[in-house]
Image (cartoon, helix red, strand yellow):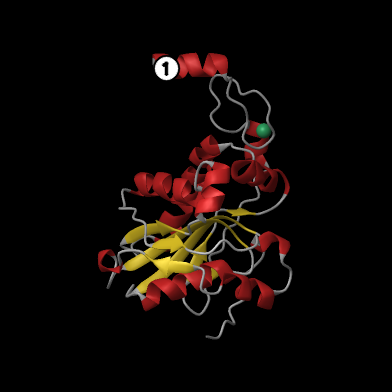
Amino acid sequence: MKPVKWLLDLIYPPKCVLCGRLLQKDEEHACPRCLLELPILTVLLDGGDFYSACAAPFRYEGKLRESILRYKFGGKRHYAQFYAEYLAASIQAQLGGKFDLITWVPISRRRHRERGYDQARTLAELTAKRLGCPCVQTLKKTKHNRRQSGIDSDEARRANVKGVYRAVKPERFAGKRLLLIDDIITTGSTISECAFTLRRAGASGVAAAVTAAARAPKTTVSR
Ligand SMILES: [Zn+2]
């Protein structure tokens, strides 16, 4: 064990990312009990009008859901290591060879200031590293909108994200197939909007991958 890690483990003993229990020496990220209960998702989700499909290792429920909420709103940035391991495996199995570049769904500057990190970017970078794939920023969120999680109807969710993203340096991804990473998918309207923006800016195709799927995304988006 590296001295720095040894010291950090002493000051901040590693806890299970799912239940918060202190981990034993040979355990990493999660305790054996939680690993057995993981809400694993094995199907590849259908895409929307602007993206081909969405890979997700987990269903967004129970302790996994609470864990993601702590990752997003509770400052638990290091949880990303755990999610990236599963995300990379799911991408490899379901979308391997189908993309050239990895990118992410960005948050607004204001949200970034509040949170201190961009949760999807952190996931994308760690996952890309595991897959040995380049990871680049392709989008910027130019408007600070309401959180999607507080909006119920599909139509209102689509309206809430419409036109809030802008392509960044499209020459870097023109003609390429992108893999867009986010933390969760609910109706797919955020991913669809990002994919639309990327396709319009020249991407030849967009597939998506998220840590967890809250429900199967609807595929009827007209533009
Ligand atoms: Zn646990």
The picture quadrant where one finds residue 25 is top right
Secondary structure at numbered mark 1: helix
Q: Nearer the viewer, residue 133 or 4?
A: 4
Q: Quadrant of the N terminus?
A: top left
Left or right of 154 in this view: 111 = left
Image x and y of residue 64, in percent? 66, 45
Query: Which residue is nearer to you in this view: 115 or 137?
Result: 115
Above or below for 36 versus 151: above
Q: Position of residue 70 (x, y in %)?
A: 65, 41
Q: Residue at point 51% right, 65% down?
A: 54
Residue most extreme to the bottom: 222
Whether residue 51 is visible here, answered yes or no, is no
| Residue name at image x 58 percent, y 44 percent | 114
Q: Is residue 120 left or right of residue 66?
A: left
Q: Position of residue 155 (x, y in %)?
A: 67, 78
What residue did someone put label 1 on?
A: 4
Q: Is mark 1 within 8 Å of ligand 1?
A: no
**Residue type, numbered disc 1:** Val
Pick the front one: 124 or 132: 124
> Is residue 223 visible in this depiction of the protein?
yes
Q: Residue at x 58, y 78 (%)?
A: 219
> Image quadrant of ligand 1?
top right
